[in-house]
Amino acid sequence: MLIVSNWSMRKGRYMRTHLTAPQIKDYIIDTIIIKSKLILRKSDLDELLQKSSLSFASGLLKSDSRTIGFRPEELQELINEIRRNIGDVDHRDGLVITNFIADNERLSKDFEVMIKNSIALLSWHREEFGVEKPLGLEFIDKAISEYGVSELSVFLFLEKMSIHLNESIGSEFSQRIHEEPIDLDNLFKSENLPENSFFDQRFINYLSMNYDKLETIHWRQFEGLVAEFFAREGYEITLNKGRNDGGIDIIARNKIEETVTIIQCKRYRKNRSVSVESVKSFCFDVIDGNFNQGIIVTTSYLTDGEKKIYRNRYPISEVEHHELESWLHKMFK
């Protein structure tokens, strides 16, 4: 990975770094892997650069092998914008903490004490426990006993520091430190779903910021997304194998109400309606299996004529393209 050093001052102006566009793009991709644990292809990066309003981004798209002069803070700004646009960095977290501290006089004073003495505290921890040990209870206890600050102020200080390091390209710290990188391309080409959930959170965050991509993801990934939503809503989920499943993609059991809902997932282009034949077949599945409810979830839509097939006749409802966006925002974290 290329190293972009911290900028220094010379005669009141920031030092400029010079690299070729391919080198800068490689650095950005490497940083995204470390920070966001998401593997982007160069075509993915170019698409994100095209959406950027930053002049530095447009310069990267126009240049080839020629060197580009830039200030490190310009690269920092661009990488953070890209991370926001893939759903990885949410500046509201830091803002919420800042506002919370500002609204509490005692907390504000304690937080100022923490900032003033942070170098001394961090140096103490490094000398006592080494550079590899994360800051933990021993750091909190030391701050409280040494400076008389509240436990909450220390927690908020650590959280703010975590957010800062996570956003800084000068640090390899990542808030996703325990996750293995995942290839964004899998969202569009792979049938493989996570082992411990139905759909990866990083893909949820990405789609929340790139909703237009939803209709192009792999059909199995779409089934995983729908299953994940209902699992978070408290249902016990059976996700069928995806092929030759008779039109029933997901079985969702509500143990409290003792009801069983079957779900059919249709990942189509948004301008292609679900077919009449699919709707009629699903109506039969609901009645034949004596299920309490059926739901058709689609990235496209159903026509009024298709809805008339089951409206006021069968316990079937639909979730269409425009409603899925609110699902993604609800699942974002």
Image (cartoon, rainbow, N blue to C red):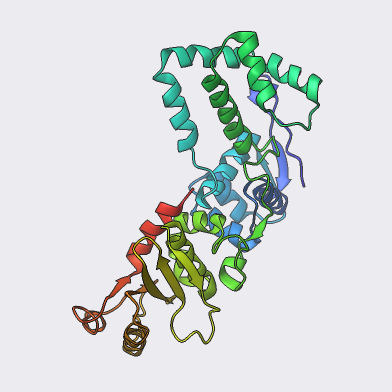
Where residue 52 appears, x then y in whole percent?
50, 50
Hey, which residue is sitting farthest top in the picture?
Answer: 147
Q: Residue at x 56, y 55 (%)?
A: 202
Asked if residue 268 is positioned above or below residue 197 in the image, the reply reads below
| Location of residue 39 (image quadrant) | bottom right
Residue in the foreground of this view, choosing between 97 and 19: 97
Residue in the foreground of this view, choosing between 35 and 10: 35
Residue in the foreground of this view, choosing between 262 and 160: 262
From the viewer's perspective, tell me whether residue 230 is left or right of residue 161: left
Where residue 329 appears, x then y in whole percent?
41, 53
From the viewer's perspective, tell me whether residue 82 is left or right of residue 35: left
- Please indicate, yes or no, whether residue 269 appears anywhere in the rendered image: no
Hey, which residue is sitting farthest left in the picture?
Answer: 312
Q: Residue at x 47, y 16 (%)?
A: 107
From the viewer's perspective, tell me whether residue 181 is left or right of residue 273: right
From the viewer's perspective, tell me whether residue 138 is left or right of residue 62: right
Q: Residue at x 80, y 20 (%)?
A: 128
Q: Count the marks.
A: 0
- Please indicate, yes or no, whether residue 11 appears anywhere in the rendered image: yes
Asked if residue 218 is positioned above or below residue 89 in the image, the reply reads below
| Location of residue 116 (image quadrant) | top right
